[in-house]
Image (tube, rainbow, N blue to C red):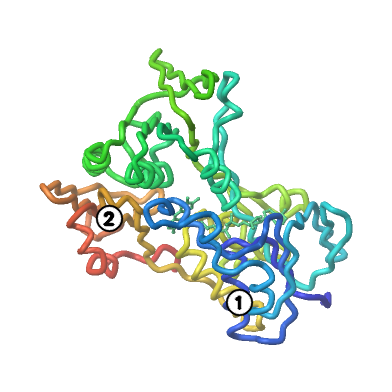
């Protein structure tokens, strides 16, 4: 048994959720938190509706690192990147030099934005937003600009599109798939969302492949495989995330799509744990807030001395597109069944049921979102 603090790497919602839950159970346990970034506490989901809610990169921060350290009685090292894990000796190597010993290690490393391999001299000017620093760069770039193209019509792309359109920007959204939220909505629901977002001025270019981005003076020209081209002031890429697994992989920890952990959030090394966007819990990579909340509660209990497996109930996700309120609880990957879709004037109710009529997932848009609570209790748990 190695002595040393619980060391948490990462100051996102996952890292801080573990700290908070742990402090409810044990006010004395030594805890150190290391982060490659500023380590201020902010709610990442608020980035994609910050314009309409009147938030700036500064006002999005609830508490800076000093305040968090003081409130939670932990040691926090901002701008401290961990470069390797020596599992035999329980030591972390830090990028700026130095080492830190750990008793137990929690990896809350998040995920990287996927970058499309695009040609053209403007490809390196494409922005993406996965944290507060990215968002600050984006808001600086947005100063005095109006025309934005967003590559990717998934959850994050649609949310930013709605926020920017509501703030008076002209927004193009480009996606290779035939509908927005292609992974979450059946086609009729996707078409409804597209109509509602188009009604607030968002222009969709679907079934469209982006090939190149060229500089055009101060602007950028995005070239589609169809030959069409779109000029804009800013191009945002929102094509998906890839869990950060390299640190774990280099230390010989098992990784797959994410860092592989069991229901105790434990890797094959019993002293090393992972949660949040970097983790794959029993085969599931779920880059959302609610899984983090459940995982952090269980992990804190385990770290405080009571091994506690995580269980996920059904965890609907609210899509922050006020032009078309949407809530989704997608069926498990590989679930067998079919969508039953009811499209009305004021909304869409889409239920995914198996052959026996059991509800396995749903997508509710517009007025149908009021049925969320009634339907959620009928869903099976995500992880028993
Ligand atoms: C714009 C946007 C909107 C979203 N909206 C919603 C929503 O409405 N609902 C919802 O459920 N989810 C939403 N999500 C997803 C949700 O925000 C994430 O699932 C969650 O914030 C991930 O938290 P995390 O702590 O796992 O990762 P992160 O917040 O990415 O934190 C990772 C931390 O690890 C640190 N780190 C990484 N590597 C190292 C290293 N080697 N050494 C030291 N530190 C390191 C980073 O600096 C960072 O502090 C949204 C995401 C985005 C981007």
Indicate whether 58 appears above or below 339. below
Q: Residue furthest left?
A: 345
Q: Residue furthest top?
A: 227
Q: Residue furthest front?
A: 144
Question: How crowded is the residue under tag 1: few (<14 C-alpha within 10 Å), some, or many (20+)?
Answer: many
Residue 289 x, y percent position in the rendering = 47, 62
Classify the position of the N terminus by image quarter.
bottom right
Ligand 1 position by quadrant: bottom right
For residue 376, side relative to residue 269 (left or right) = left
Label 2, secondary structure: give it.
strand
Residue beneath disc 1: 300
Residue 248 x, y percent position in the rendering = 72, 53
Q: Earlier in the sequence, mark 1 or mark 2?
A: 1
Residue 332 visible to the viewer: yes
Label 1, secondary structure: give it.
helix
For residue 141, side relative to residue 96 (left or right) = left
* Whole-number angstrom distance, CA of label 1 to CA of label 2: 31 Å
Considering depth in this image, is 125 or 57 the residue closer to the camera?
Answer: 57
Residue at image coords 29%, 66%:
376
Residue at image coords 34%, 41%:
168
Q: Are marks 1 and 2 in contact (CB under 8 Å)?
A: no
Query: Of the numbered discs in the image, which one, if any, rests on residue 362?
Result: 2
Considering depth in this image, is 56 or 38 the residue closer to the camera?
Answer: 56
Indicate whether 52 appears above or below 100. above
Question: How crowded is the residue under tag 2: few (<14 C-alpha within 10 Å), some, or many (20+)?
Answer: many
Query: Of the numbered discs in the image, which one, if any, rests on residue 260?
Result: none
Considering depth in this image, is 282 or 274 the residue closer to the camera?
Answer: 274
Residue at image coords 54%, 48%:
135
Classify the position of the C terminus by image quarter.
bottom left
């Amino acid at each position: 048994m190695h002595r040393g603090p619980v060391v948490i790497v990462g100051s996102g919602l996952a890292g801080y959720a573990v700290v908070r839950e742990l402090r409810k159970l044990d006010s004395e346990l030594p805890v150190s938190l290391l982060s490659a970034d500023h380590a201020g506490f902010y709610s990442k989901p608020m980035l994609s509706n910050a314009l309409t809610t009147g938030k700036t990169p500064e006002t999005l921060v609830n508490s800076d690192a000093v305040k968090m350290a003081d409130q939670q009685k932990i040691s926090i090292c901002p701008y401290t990147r961990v470069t390797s894990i020596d599992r035999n000796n329980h030591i972390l190597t830090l990028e700026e030099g130095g080492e830190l010993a750990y008793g137990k290690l929690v990896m809350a490393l998040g995920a990287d934005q996927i970058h499309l391999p695009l040609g053209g001299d403007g490809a390196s000017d494409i922005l993406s937003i996965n944290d507060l620093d990215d968002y600050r760069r984006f808001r600086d770039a947005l100063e005095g600009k109006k025309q934005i193209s967003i590559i990717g019509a998934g959850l994050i792309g649609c949310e930013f599109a709605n926020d920017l359109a509501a703030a008076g920007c002209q927004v193009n959204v480009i996606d290779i798939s035939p509908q927005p939220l292609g992974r979450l909505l059946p086609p009729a629901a996707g078409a409804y969302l597209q109509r509602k977002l188009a009604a607030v001025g968002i222009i969709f270019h679907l079934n469209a492949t982006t090939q190149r981005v060229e500089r055009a003076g101060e602007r950028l020209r995005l070239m589609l495989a169809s030959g069409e081209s779109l000029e804009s002031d800013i191009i945002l890429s929102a094509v998906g995330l890839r869990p950060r697994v390299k640190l774990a992989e280099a230390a010989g920890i098992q990784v797959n799509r994410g860092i592989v952990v069991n229901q105790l959030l434990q890797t094959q090394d019993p002293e090393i744990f992972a949660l949040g966007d970097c983790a794959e819990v029993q085969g599931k990579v779920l880059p959302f807030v609610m899984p983090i909340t459940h995982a952090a509660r269980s992990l804190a209990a385990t770290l405080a001395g009571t091994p506690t497996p995580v269980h996920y109930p059904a965890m609907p996700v609210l899509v922050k597109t006020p032009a078309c309120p949407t809530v989704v609880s997608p069926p498990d990957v590989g679930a067998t069944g079919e969508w039953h879709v009811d499209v009305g004037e004021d909304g869409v109710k889409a239920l995914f049921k198996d052959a026996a009529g059991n509800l396995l997932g749903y997508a509710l848009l517009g007025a149908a979102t009021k049925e969320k609570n009634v339907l959620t209790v009928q869903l099976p748990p995500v992880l028993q």
